[in-house]
Amino acid sequence: MTAERIDGKALAEKVRAEVADDVRAYGGSVCLATILVGDDPASHVYVGKKHDASHEAGIESRDHRFASETPESVILDLLAELDDDDGVDGILVQLPLPAHMDEPKVLHAVDPAKDVDGFHPLNAGLLYLGTPHLVPATPSGVMVMLAEYGVELRGKEAVVVGRSEIVGKPMAMLLLMEHATVTICHSRTADLSEHTRRADILVAAVGRPGLVTPDMVKAGATVIDIGVNRTEAGLVGDVDPAVFEVAGLMTPVPGGVGPMTIAMLLRNTLTAAQHRRSEVALPGS
Ligand code: GUN
């Protein structure tokens, strides 16, 4: 039996259309500012797509791009300006930053109320405490996919492979909030397949092409591939496509999780605008 494919492209289009409707209903202007430092071609493509998608949803955007050797202080000064600018609702610092920059220091300089990536410690802490406000786009896109396809999470075994701040950890927290029994695996996990074979929901987010093979997957499991690996064979995920023959439901790469990330970024930008303009304090602040 072949797994049903989760169509991330179609679902992302639906979410983007919903956000566009909600932006119109909101009435006021909504503005996203992005900062990109350096010349990583993939980052330039991603940021370009974020601006195109914002425009399509009726969200204004500002595009700040800098050469790789730009001093960190220039970025911190710009962040201070954007934080204070009432016309800016969302701020996104594209990662990775050049090696001479202190990534946490830069990310912590984003106003948590405008932190549409959900990377600021306040937003990470709110998610940890089970009272999320702005949640990282990729894992929240996965949750929308699981809900859309009716995947039961309560009491199920969810295994997340990868413990990054932007995907693995927030993914685990979101699954936990839906009452899954969550295991986080990583590069030092002693016997990876012992864990993955138990999973009703298996999420791979490590950046290792084809890491998850059919023998590592329980028959009928839901498999979510967050890997984005550029190889000579093109864009491939962390999951071997042969897993389609074992899983019950699975995301393809490309066309799975990727398109959802931008859709959720737009949703977060509108949420930040609505929240800021209504002057409701962030939980706990
Ligand atoms: N680089 C790779 N993924 C992301 C993301 O979700 N947000 C930002 N800002 N940078 C990234």
Image (cartoon, helix red, strand yellow):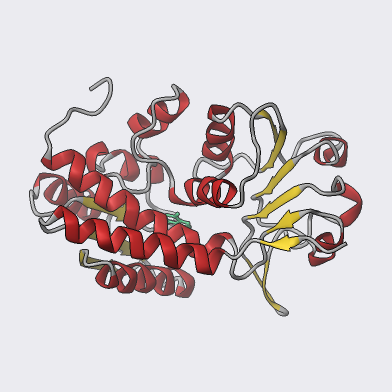
Could you say where residue 169 lies in the image, as x and y percent from the top left? 56, 36
Residue drawn at point x = 25 percent, y = 71 percent: 55
**On screen, residue 160 above or below 259:** above
Front in this rendered view, residue 112 or 250: 250
**Quadrant of ligand 1 in image:** bottom left
Residue drawn at point x = 47 percent, y = 26 percent: 128
Could you say where residue 10 lies in the image, as x and y percent from the top left? 51, 68
Residue drawn at point x = 27 percent, y = 24 percent: 283
**On screen, residue 129 above or below 165:** above
159 horizontally vs 172: left or right: right
64 horizontally vs 196: left or right: left
The answer to whether residue 213 shows anywhere in this view is: yes
**On screen, residue 233 above or below 93:** below
Could you say where residue 273 lies in the image, as x and y percent from the top left? 19, 47
Residue extending farthest right: 215
Residue drawn at point x = 12 percent, y = 37 percent: 278
Front in this rendered view, residue 254 or 7: 7
81 horizontally vs 47: left or right: left
266 horizontally vs 242: left or right: left
Front in this rendered view, residue 85 or 138: 138
Q: Identify the image quadrant of the N terminus.
A: bottom right
Could you say where residue 218 lies in the image, as x and y percent from the top left? 86, 45
The answer to whether residue 185 shows anywhere in this view is: no
Q: Identify the image quadrant of the C terminus.
A: top left
